[in-house]
Image: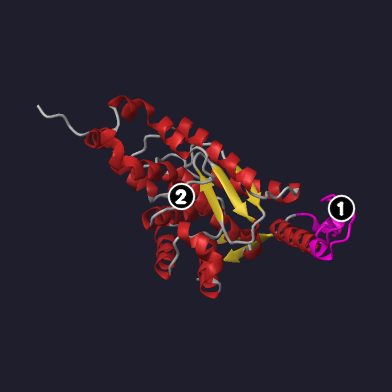
């Protein structure tokens, strides 16, 4: 009897991964956390995925200029962790801020997310920022990176020994990625993956209390920016393709699957303060670089920032809420 090709064995092993129950739950935001959204052929165990992501994240950290202001980094991490708690993700997350003016954020396998300062600056309100971060969390929850890595190698599976196929593929994948900053295999998503991340991301925003249309708003800003400055956004759109159809589809999905709430979180005074702090810090750095003269370095949080010069009564975060239009 002729034996099946190795690739056929793989798909046979993966059969039954997608269940009707999971598909129904995916449309129900009340089931967030109790459903499996990672329905794809994947040879990476969760443990190997985290290990691979950690390795890649260390490379990014070594070769990028990370923001070290504790107030900014703590706030971004707090917003991210709140969204993670309202997601389907099964791994712990870390959030780091990269000093980069491009409007971007990206996720690595296993829950490692990097947010560019350019995203904070262009997102005027917290729900817009949360929309971009929730989208990246969705990529991790659906395990798009390692699913894509598996898919990209599947044509060569027939040449691999069965022992590697069944027991050592994750290690093989990790070795293939070693020594590369961020292989495009882990960052370049097709429209299907992007659409799924949009779909899940707005659910995570909604579950965390945000106005899900904040995702539409930040998408529209990205679309407008790419038309105004195509060179600036070329790198972002190579990994996050954007068009009007995608924006319209997300709006329709919000209307279809998310029950209306009387109020949503749109912005907070803390987000405004952190964003203004970032802009002020970058402004001072640019001024110092331009001047070239030695200057006294001021420790962040010492009270010199205009953002921090507030009365005690203004220190409490305030929530701006958007009432639904009848």
The stretch of residues the image draws in magenta is 287-316
Look at the picture and state if 170 lies above or below 187: above
> Residue 318 in magenta?
no
C-alpha separation, residue under disc 2 versus residue under disc 1: 39 Å
Say which residue label 1 marks. Answer: 298
- Residue 184, numbered circle: 2
Q: Name the residue located 36 percent from the left edge and 26 percent from the top edge.
A: 167
Q: Which corner quadrant of the image does residue 104 belong to?
A: bottom right
Mark 2 vs mark 1: give the one in front.
2
Q: Name the residue located 38 percent from the left edge and 48 percent from the top edge.
A: 26
Q: Is residue 220 or residue 86 the one in the foreground?
A: 220
Q: Residues within 10 Å of mark 2 (few under 14, many from 20)?
A: some
Look at the picture and state if 237 lies above or below 84: below
| Colour setup of the view | secondary structure
Coordinates of residue 201 in the picture (x, y in percent): 48, 53
In the image, 88: left or right of 302? left
Coordinates of residue 8 in the picture (x, y in percent): 22, 36
């Amino acid at each position: 009897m002729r034996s099946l090709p190795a690739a056929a064995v793989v798909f046979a092993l993966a059969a039954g991964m997608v269940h009707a129950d999971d598909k129904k739950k995916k449309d129900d935001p009340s089931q967030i956390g109790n459903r499996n959204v990672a329905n794809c052929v994947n040879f990476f165990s969760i443990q190997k995925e985290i290990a691979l992501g950690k390795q890649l994240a260390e490379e990014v950290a070594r070769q990028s200029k990370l923001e070290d202001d504790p107030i900014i980094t703590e706030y971004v991490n707090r917003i991210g962790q709140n969204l993670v708690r309202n997601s389907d993700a099964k791994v712990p997350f870390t959030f780091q801020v990269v000093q980069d003016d491009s409007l971007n954020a990206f996720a690595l396998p296993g829950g490692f997310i990097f947010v560019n300062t350019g995203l904070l600056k262009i997102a005027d309100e917290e729900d817009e920022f949360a929309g971009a971060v929730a989208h990246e969390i969705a990529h991790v929850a659906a395990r798009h990176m390692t699913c894509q890595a598996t898919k990209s190698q599947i044509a060569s599976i027939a040449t691999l020994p069965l022992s590697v196929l069944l027991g050592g593929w994750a290690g093989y994948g990790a070795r293939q990625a070693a020594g590369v900053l961020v292989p495009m295999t882990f960052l370049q998503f097709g429209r299907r993956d992007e659409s799924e991340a949009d779909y899940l991301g707005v659910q995570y925003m909604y579950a965390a209390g945000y106005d899900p249309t904040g995702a539409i708003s930040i998408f529209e800003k990205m679309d407008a920016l790419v038309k105004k400055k195509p060179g600036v956004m070329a790198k972002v759109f190579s990994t996050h393709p954007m068009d009007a159809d995608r924006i319209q589809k997300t709006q329709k999905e919000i209307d279809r699957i998310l029950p209306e709430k009387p109020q949503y979180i749109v912005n907070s005074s803390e987000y405004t303060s952190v964003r203004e702090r970032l802009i002020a810090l970058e402004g001072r750095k640019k001024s110092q670089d331009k001047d070239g003269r030695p200057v006294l370095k001021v420790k962040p949080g010492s009270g010199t920032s205009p953002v921090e010069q507030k009365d005690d009564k203004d220190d409490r975060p305030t929530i701006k809420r958007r009432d639904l239009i009848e």
